[in-house]
Image (tube, grey):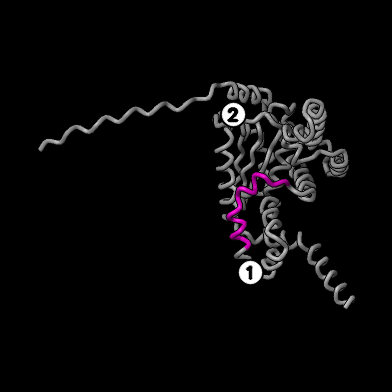
Amino acid sequence: TFGLVAAFVALLAGVWFAKEPMVRAIAARVPAEWEIALGDTAFKQVTVSHKLITDRAVQRQLDQLAQPLLAVVPQERYPFHLHIVENATLNAFALPGGHVAIHSGLLLTAESPEEVLGVLGHELSHVTKQHGTRALIQNVGLFAVVQAFLGDATGLLAVVANNAPFLLTQKFSRDHEREADEQGLRYLAAAKLNPRGLITFFEKMRREEERMKEQLPGGDALDSLSFLSTHPPTPERVARLEQLIAKSAGAGNYAKVNVDFKAFQQALRAQLSQPEKKPEPKKPKAPDAPKAN
């Protein structure tokens, strides 16, 4: 009896440790159109609760800033869309299918384009590595994952398609964050962009976290620094990034970012300072003229 129990426990342990590879394999089978539709649905909810900066000149400047990085990111599967959310917190997030949003507070706190590009490389990696979709699949339960892996993924994919709101509240696992760090550095290296921008921005946020902790009690400080609460820049993580950069090919041979970053920030501040336009009240419709008999 003990032997049977031990064998059963060993079987469960084996299935559990194989869960992540199974999830990755199932996510690869999800049609791109499903992920894009999932991300579109989630992003529509963002636009309901948050104001976006839609000025075309500012958007062009952001796209120009991101162009060297986007040029090396595979785009066969997803059309990437960059957005600026009007929010003072230091945050950025990515959704399945290609939506990447950066808070205005992060853009204005950054001291160089390389810092923004470091964060952007990390977020783009969440998309290309399907972390949002994989997190949804993992949360439906081990049995459903095993069932889908063995061939019947219909039910699981239907659950994934109906859970777009979950994407806005999820926090990626440490493994997903490490994977996004590594892939983000590869993208930066391929674009010949200085990857230390990600590290300097992490260090900047850590200093801000310490300052906020002195002013706000408990977890309120992390709530005010949303990017930190979902992307904790621990000393160990920064040290690991330093090691990866030191080992990367072409370290130190970086291209200059041809964008006037200060002008971009100035244009963004100008948009943020504009008063919000209130919709004009609708004029009452004139009554129809009486018809002649």
- Which corner quadrant of the image does residue 238 belong to? top right
| Quadrant containing the C terminus in the rendered view | top left
- Mark 2 or 1, nearer chain start: 2
Q: In 3D space, how far apart are the residues under numbered discs 2 and 1 (Cα atoms)?
A: 46 Å
Residue 293 belongs to the span the image colors magenta: no
Read off the residue under disc 2: 58
Classed neighbour count for the residue bearing mark 2: other residues with Cα under 10 Å, few (<14), some (14–19), many (≥20): many
Residue drawn at (79%, 50%), measured in percent from left and top? Answer: 175
Q: Specify the principal SS of the magenta part.
A: helix
Amino acid type of the residue tagged 2 in the rendering:
Val
x, y (%) of residue 193?
75, 37
User: Which quadrant, please, contains the N terminus?
Assistant: bottom right
State the residue in front, 127 or 211. Answer: 211
Q: Element under label 2?
A: helix
Q: Is residue 284 above or below residue 70?
A: above
Query: Which residues, given as a range, are shown in magenta?
Result: 156-171
Residue picked out by circle 1: 152
Question: Please, what is the three-letter code of the amino acid marked with disc 1?
Answer: Asp
